[in-house]
Image (cartoon, rainbow, N blue to C red):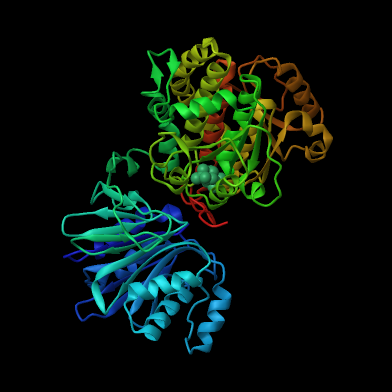
Amino acid sequence: MCGIVAAVTQRNIIDFLLESIQRLEYRGYDSSGLALINKNNNFIRVRCIGKVSQLIKKTKNKKLFGKIGLAHTRWATHGKVSEENTHPHISSHIAIVHNGIIENSFQLRLFLEKQGYIFYSDTDTEVIVHLLHWEQKKTGKSLLEAMHNSLIRLHGNYSMVVMDTHNSSRLIAVCSGSPLIIGLGIGENFIASDQIALLNITKRFIYLKEGDIAIVQPEQTQIFNKHNSIVQRKIIQSDVQYECVKKGKYKHYMEKEIYEQPTSIRNTLKHRLKNNKTIDFPELGVQEKNIFLHLEHIQIVACGTSYHAAMVSKHWFESIANIPCDVEVASEFSSRKLAVRKKSFFITLSQSGETADTLTALRISKKLGYLGNLTICNMKGSSLVQESDNCLLTKAGIEIGVASTKSFTTQLTVLLMLVAKIVSIKQKKNDIEKKIVKILNILPYRIEEILKKNQEIKNIAKKLYHTKNMIFLGRRDQYPIAMEGALKLKEISYIHAEAYPSGELKHGPLALIDKNIPIIITAPNNSLIEKTKKNIQEICSRGGLIYIFSDAEMNLEKNITLFKVPYVEEIIAPIFYIIPLQLLAYYIALSKGTNIDQPRNLAKSVTVE
Ligand code: AGP
């Protein structure tokens, strides 16, 4: 949700700012802007609505020069998409870029207007920059002190970077509930909301912690914690390759990420399978394993695709480990009075580790007496990882497409390993664990096999891309897969799609059935297949158009298209059956010509509640 890049160097940074902010476009792409301090110590600001390519066009012949600067790509929250609302915002000698929401901005705006400030935008960001200016003017002290005083007045989650023409060799960065990292160069330093922006320049990063304020100069950085004491934060050497953030031979990041799934899953399994027989999570301490022995309930909280992965795991926790498991959308979990089960363990799932709803849920859970907590996350150093007692990284690699794909299948991989581990700890025998390890080892090969059937999916997509509505059906552990398939389709093709448990269709949605609403059904050949076949009959007899993804033999009536799914072990069927649905959504969106990697109105990580 909004991308920030800033640099303080000894060279002209215009090209760096443009290139880096373009790499953060997945965080928001309503509008973008940048500001530099030029040789005459004045701000030069360029802003425009639309994608960063528009900003690049607009700056092209301007011969801009500056050794210090800020850039921003916006996902609109306060105020419509317009040039006036685009960052950076300026108050006299101070410029700012900001991510997050200031909840009390309305009151502060009224106060500042009374002090004579004129607002040129509807944003909460302009409130911050005027407040900073007012604080500094009032006390006559440094911008850093003005920042400390201003932060006391700001309510909400945010990260921001400011620069000042009165001291043009330093940036001030603040991190509070929304991520910021410092990239360390040689004689130059950088700030960004995500390491992806800086990977072509440095591999050395400092992840700012909650409440940190950093002063960043070309040769040094100084960090104050929330108690205003100077602190040393660990420098992390990133192992992410710059090449990973390139599309390579693929048209879209989403396509690349779908096809990367066998590799991502292999990376997730790597170093965690002992002698290829049992599972080891070196990240978890002995104490945690003790907790697993005693837990009697699992509560999982997540959003979107991560929530769907959690729903699949509920089935695994209950059917394999016999542990009651509840799953809830994070924003709902945080919106109600909760009754916590006895000996319950709290798990969050997140690709980004920055989803505000999930973070809030974690913070609330800490006051509720859970046995402990664990996050399953793809982003090392993210807020969820920092704030959780324990973390299992999914190791999917950087996911740039707004629609999650490889993060889903690697989350499921980690969850299945966790279920297996907990069963062994609780039952003090590891036969189930050994069986799961064997199946997980085969999984990447199975996925390679189904990815090869892409031409068949392309053919189905050609028949479906002009449709306006679709229904996805699945039973038991395939119901979350139907939900995830429908979400993928909605996100990138803008086709309205609903998911139902197959058995629920006759309780109402059957009224929708006609030849204009294609029905997608995932139905592995297991103990539930006969029930699903009956549902198929119910749809057929009402003239519905059906697309079945199954390894079972089917009676192919004229309205039925069968995509023959290769055989897969029942336990991993949910991980497997999502692959054709991801491809289907992708090829439908491709035929429609939508902006697949940056669908309208969305952002990759949602850092506001
Ligand atoms: C998935 O395609 C979506 N982009 C979205 O639902 C996403 O899964 C959700 O916002 C949660 O994100 P997280 O996994 O980073 O917490």
Residue 355 percent location from the top left of the image: 52, 49
Q: Nearer the viewer, residue 394 or 405?
A: 394
Residue 492 percent location from the top left of the image: 54, 46
Residue pictured at 40% horizontal, 34% vertical: 395
The answer to which image quadrant residue 219 occupies is bottom left
Q: Nearer the viewer, residue 227 or 517?
A: 227
In the displayed structure, would residue 588 be above or below residue 383? above
- Look at the image and tell me whether residue 193 can be seen: yes
Is 217 positioned to the left or the right of 550 in the image? left
Residue pictured at 58% horizontal, 14% vertical: 427
Is 593 positioned to the left or the right of 54 in the image? right
- Look at the image and tell me whether residue 591 can be seen: no
Is 333 positioned to the left or the right of 44 in the image? right
Is 9 positioned to the left or the right of 449 in the image? left
Residue 297 percent location from the top left of the image: 64, 30
In the displayed structure, would residue 525 be above or below residue 196? above
Residue pictured at 45% horizontal, 69% vertical: 151
In the displayed structure, would residue 52 be above or below residue 286? below
Specify the quadrant that holds the C terminus.
Answer: bottom right
User: What is the count of numbered marks?
Assistant: 0
Residue pictured at 45% horizontal, 26% vertical: 286
The answer to which image quadrant residue 185 occupies is bottom left
In the displayed structure, would residue 465 be above or below residue 123? above
